[in-house]
């Protein structure tokens, strides 16, 4: 039995002067199992953030339901922790007080000592030991985002929702925090739903990658299962031949197929069961080199490097 | 600003002040003043005007000596019409504090409510827009008629003039609290009271404080005029009384004092505003 089920989700806006409603996305169906890390990838305007906000309970769908652990999601809840795109820290509170705000919301009657202990544990977890008493303005972008992650983790939610959390960070910082996130999620068996624009990030973190076609009227075009071993790490992932197969598949989708899908959806497409694909496994199958020939051309230099 | 720049600006300030004193001194030197033609006027001004030796306008030295007198003994009471300048200014400060404090008690909670609800915001807006530009002194006759007490009426006038900037700024500050902070509170299932005091209030505090600073400035402007109208006590009454006594020196002392107290009030509010401002 899946942990989270999204059924027939749709979001549309009535145009101000009447006429046909503007449909952002429609017929979105997917499931997330407990402990699974799911990324959603798609171009701007396909409604990824709206889907996340509906899961968080901050936005309402025009149609469809979200069921988490057997109960319909209606409004925000402490069961779902959110890491916001722009960290959303309160600038008048220190890093620790920001986390404390969440902890006190979760455990209203906890003792001072217990609250301190939880705050410290999660600040340590994201590597912010020593910066507890700094205000957000005194922290770097990466540190601010870590506080945001600590705040979301500290309430020990049943599910974590991350809205492009590393989008504003430089590549180096992003890599470090990705590794940490992976470690924390592995340790806590956290169920995660995350939006990203970064294909490499999706492959590193996600067990399942939802590909959304271009909006308006976006759909989940297909679900890519990440067949790389779960103990993958940033340092070794690119040495696995599967990595390039998956990466090329994703890039290929974003470059051309996401648009084609909206214009001419495949005849056998069923939005209730978007096709699940495993491009990583196709590496060893004899048919694959042909199908991979086109997308690989774009990254041929890298491929040659690996083969050597 | 670097230290040397600050020193230079201070020197320039002193230079400008010295120049101002010098011009003042020259303009009021004996014999330079106009002849007092009106005997009635001359009688009132005393011998100086009668002889035409000295201008009715005091020299900087006269004002300085007068000021020294006031500073030496600011709190004397010699009957209802002759009280020390310190007592007068204390009355004015007291009225401003009372009127301003009452206005804050009304404006901040009401502004909070208006800011939280777009419906109330729009519903209150026309009233605020009409009431805001009314000169606070225009309320004075109405206040005197309904309250029937001049001292309370002047406090009411201060109340009404302090109300609008605080109300408008509070409502604006509260309505402009970032969506993302409210969303954080929502996802954490924070209670409405806790949200109001721990998210909205600190987020809007700098804007609210700015409104309070504007209010206290206006209140201090208005109190002088109100006391001139109402009479009895206060620095405004003092100025008017000294005009009737034709003591320009005393008026100048009062003007200087009004400026200093106004600056002090503004600085206190500015200090408070800085304490609640957060860098982003």
Image: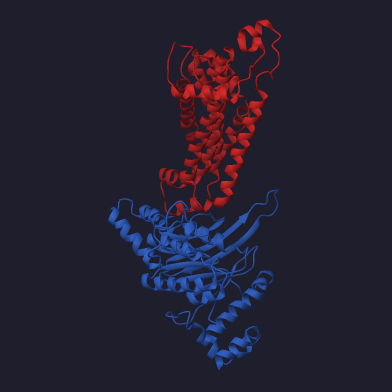
Please state the horizontal and vertical placement of residue A178, each as a whole percent of the image.
47, 72
Q: Nearer the viewer, residue B165 or A35?
A: B165
Q: Is residue A280 visible?
A: no
Q: Nearer the viewer, residue A66 or B235?
A: B235
Q: How is the image coloured?
A: by chain
Using the rendered view, name the quadrant where residue B169 is placed. Answer: top right
Please state the horizontal and vertical placement of residue A304, each as a whole percent of the image.
59, 91
Q: Nearer the viewer, residue B194 or B101?
A: B101
Q: How many marks?
A: 0
Q: Is residue A76 above or below residue B87?
A: below
Residue at 59 percent of width and 77 percent of height: A250
Quadrant location, the C terminus of chain A: bottom right
Q: Is residue B46 above or below residue B190?
A: above
Q: Is residue B162 above or below residue B2?
A: above
Residue at 42 percent of width and 66 percent of height: A3
Q: Nearer the viewer, residue A31 or B278?
A: B278
State which chain is coloured blue.
A
Please state the horizontal and vertical placement of residue A86, each as a whole percent of the image.
53, 59
Direction from residue B76 to residue A120 in the image, left or right: left
Please identify the residue farthest to the bottom as the structure is shown.
A308
Residue at 38 percent of width and 71 percent of height: A189
Quadrant location, the N terminus of chain A: bottom left
Residue at 56 percent of width and 61 percent of height: A49
Direction from residue A189 to residue B27 in the image, left or right: right
Using the rendered view, name the quadrant where residue A273 is placed. Answer: bottom right
State which chain is coloured red.
B
Q: Is residue A226 visible?
A: yes
Please state the horizontal and vertical placement of residue B232, each as a whole percent of the image.
50, 14
Q: Is residue A269 above or below residue A296?
A: above
């Amino acid at each position: 039995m899946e942990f989270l089920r999204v059924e027939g989700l749709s979001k549309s806006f009535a145009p101000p002067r009447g006429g046909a409603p503007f449909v952002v996305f429609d017929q979105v169906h997917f499931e997330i199992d407990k402990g699974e890390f799911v990324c959603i990838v798609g171009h701007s305007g396909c409604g990824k953030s709206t889907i996340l906000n509906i899961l968080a309970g901050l936005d309402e769908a025009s149609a469809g339901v979200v069921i988490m652990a057997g109960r319909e999601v209606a409004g925000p809840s402490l069961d779902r922790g959110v890491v916001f795109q722009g960290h959303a820290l309160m600038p008048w509170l220190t890093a620790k007080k920001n986390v404390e705000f969440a902890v006190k919301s979760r455990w209203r009657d906890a003792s001072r000592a217990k609250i301190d202990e939880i705050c410290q544990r999660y600040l340590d977890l994201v590597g912010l030991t020593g910066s507890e008493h700094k205000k957000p303005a005194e922290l770097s972008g990466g540190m601010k985002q870590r506080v945001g992650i600590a705040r979301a983790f500290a309430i020990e939610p049943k599910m974590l929702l991350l809205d492009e959390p590393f989008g504003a960070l430089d590549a180096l910082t992003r890599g470090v925090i990705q590794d940490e996130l992976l470690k924390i999620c592995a340790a806590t068996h956290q169920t995660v739903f995350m939006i990203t624009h970064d294909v490499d990030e999706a492959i590193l973190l996600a067990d399942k990658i939802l590909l959304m076609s271009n909006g308006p009227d976006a759909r989940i075009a297909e679900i890519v299962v990440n067949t790389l071993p779960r103990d993958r790490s940033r340092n070794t992932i690119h040495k696995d031949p599967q990595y390039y197969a998956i990466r090329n598949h994703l890039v290929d989708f974003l470059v051309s197929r996401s648009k084609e899908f909206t214009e001419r959806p495949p005849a056998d497409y069923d939005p209730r069961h978007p096709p699940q694909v495993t491009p990583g496994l196709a590496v060893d199958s004899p048919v694959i080199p042909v199908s991979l020939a086109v997308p690989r051309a774009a990254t041929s230099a890298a491929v040659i490097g690996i083969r050597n | 600003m670097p230290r040397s720049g600050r020193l230079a600006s201070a020197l320039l300030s002193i230079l400008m002040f010295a120049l101002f004193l010098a011009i003042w001194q020259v303009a009021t030197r004996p014999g330079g003043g106009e002849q007092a033609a009106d005997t009635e006027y001359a009688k009132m001004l005393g011998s100086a005007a009668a002889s035409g030796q000295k201008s009715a306008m005091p020299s900087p030295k006269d004002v300085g000596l007068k000021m020294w007198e006031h500073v030496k003994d600011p709190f004397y009471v010699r009957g209802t019409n002759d009280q020390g300048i310190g007592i007068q200014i204390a009355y004015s400060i007291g009225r401003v504090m009372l009127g301003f404090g009452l206005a804050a008690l009304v404006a901040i909670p009401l502004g909070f409510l208006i800011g939280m609800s777009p419906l109330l915001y729009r519903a209150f807006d026309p009233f605020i827009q009409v009431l805001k530009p009314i000169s606070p002194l225009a309320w004075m006759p109405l206040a005197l008629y309904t309250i029937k007490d001049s001292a309370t009426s002047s406090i009411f006038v201060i109340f009404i003039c302090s109300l609008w900037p605080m109300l408008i700024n509070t409502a604006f500050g509260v309505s402009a609290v970032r969506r993302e902070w409210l969303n954080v509170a929502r996802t954490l299932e924070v209670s409405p009271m806790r949200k109001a005091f721990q998210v909205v209030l600190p987020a809007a505090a700098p804007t609210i404080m700015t409104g309070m600073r504007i209010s206290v400035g206006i209140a201090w402007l208005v109190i002088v005029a109100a006391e001139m109208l109402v009479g009895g006590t206060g620095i405004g009454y003092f100025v008017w009384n000294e005009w009737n006594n034709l003591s320009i020196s005393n008026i100048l002392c009062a003007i200087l004092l009004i400026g200093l107290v106004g600056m002090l009030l503004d600085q206190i509010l500015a200090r408070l505003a800085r304490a609640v401002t957060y860098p982003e």
